[in-house]
Each structure stands twice: as C-alpha cells, then as structure tokens.
Amino acid sequence: MKVEFNITGVDGIVQTLKSLPEEVVSKRGGPVKLSLAKGARYLRDRARENLRRSIAIGGSRSTGELEKRVIASRGKKPFGTKGERYLVRVKRRDYINADGVRTNPLMTANLLEYGSQHQPATPWLRPALTENGQAVVTLVVDDLKKRIDRAVAQLASQNKARG
C-alpha cells in the first residue's frame, strides 16, 4: 500500500530555503529532513495505536512484535527531484508470534489492512493517514518555519560577529 501527498502552499518557506547557504540546506537534509521526520514519527505513533485497536477487534493474541515493526524511516528522494521523503512502513524482519510460529510482518499487516477470504479487513494504516493527514501537514509546516527562523537568526548572529 502506498500513499503519497505533497505539501503545497508553502512557497515562502521554499524561497527562504533556496536563499539559505549550503551549510544549512545540505545533503544531510537540514531543517526539511528534521521536520519531515517529526511528522512521520507522529503518523507512525497514530498508526501503531490503530494497529493495536485492529488486533484487539480481531480478538487475536499479540506479542506486540508487529506493532514494534511499524516504523518511520527516511526514503530515497523522489526520482528526478531535489527533495526529502519519509515513509511510515512495516519493517520486514520476521518474528515469532504468540503461537510460536515464525511470521512475516508484512503479510500479517496486509492481512489486517485488507483482509482475506477467511478474515475480514480491519484497516489501521489508511485510517491513520486520513484522520491525521492534515495534522501531520500542519505539524511539519510549523516545525519547518521554526527551524528556518532559527537557522536564519543563527546565520545573522554569525555575520554580526564577523563584521
């Protein structure tokens, strides 16, 4: 399952980012990376809460291992662009379930999200995004504004000290 959204309406922030020197906006991501990471962690936490509820609805026993494997990670930049990407995804490392059987977390997460002919769907990731998408965008934009203002102020104070 893949859901992408672009943040629009932040033209002033983009212009400020373009005017900052390389030390601030670097390959390591700078303030954009940190703000997106904060938003991804917020969405990850909401997805974990939904996953916990979905498992409880199904009435199955849980070791909590699937919930631990829902992570926020930095992805490769979008093809053909300069940008950052953060993902909320399920880590692939197998685990031992409550029945003592080795289990693939991706398969389990997909079964919960989409269901099967034997098990009804109890979505957890899509509802986390639809319920909290606007809050994540607001969180990222506000945090990015703060970080850019802080970087601009720091550069201004460095320039005063030199001149």
Image (cartoon, rainbow, N blue to C red):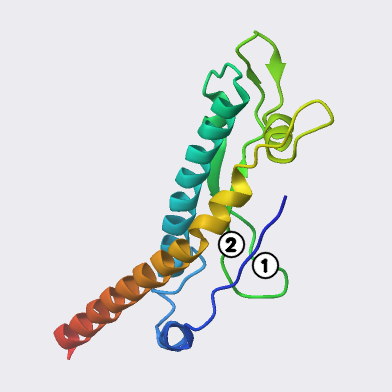
Label 1 belongs to which residue? Answer: 78
Residue 20: % across, % down: 40, 83
Left or right of residue 79: residue 36: left
Disc 2: CA contacts within 10 A as few (<14), some (14-19) or many (>=20): some
Q: Nearer the viewer, residue 116 or 97?
A: 116
Q: Quadrant of residue 56?
A: top right
Q: Secondary structure at mark 2?
A: loop
Q: Quadrant of residue 145?
A: bottom left
Q: Nearer the viewer, residue 106 or 23?
A: 106
Left or right of residue 63: residue 81: right
Badge 2 vs badge 1, beta-carbon distance below 8 Å: yes
Disc 1: CA contacts within 10 A as few (<14), some (14-19) or many (>=20): few
Q: Measuring 65% from the left and 37% from the top, which residue is drawn there?
A: 122
Q: Measuring 76% from the left and 28% from the top, which residue is drawn there?
A: 119
Label 2 belongs to which residue? Answer: 85
Between disc 2 and disc 1, whose residue precedes? 1
Residue 121: % across, % down: 71, 37
Q: Secondary structure at mark 1?
A: loop
Furthest residue toward bottom: 163
Left or right of residue 145: residue 130: right
Residue 14: % across, % down: 47, 84
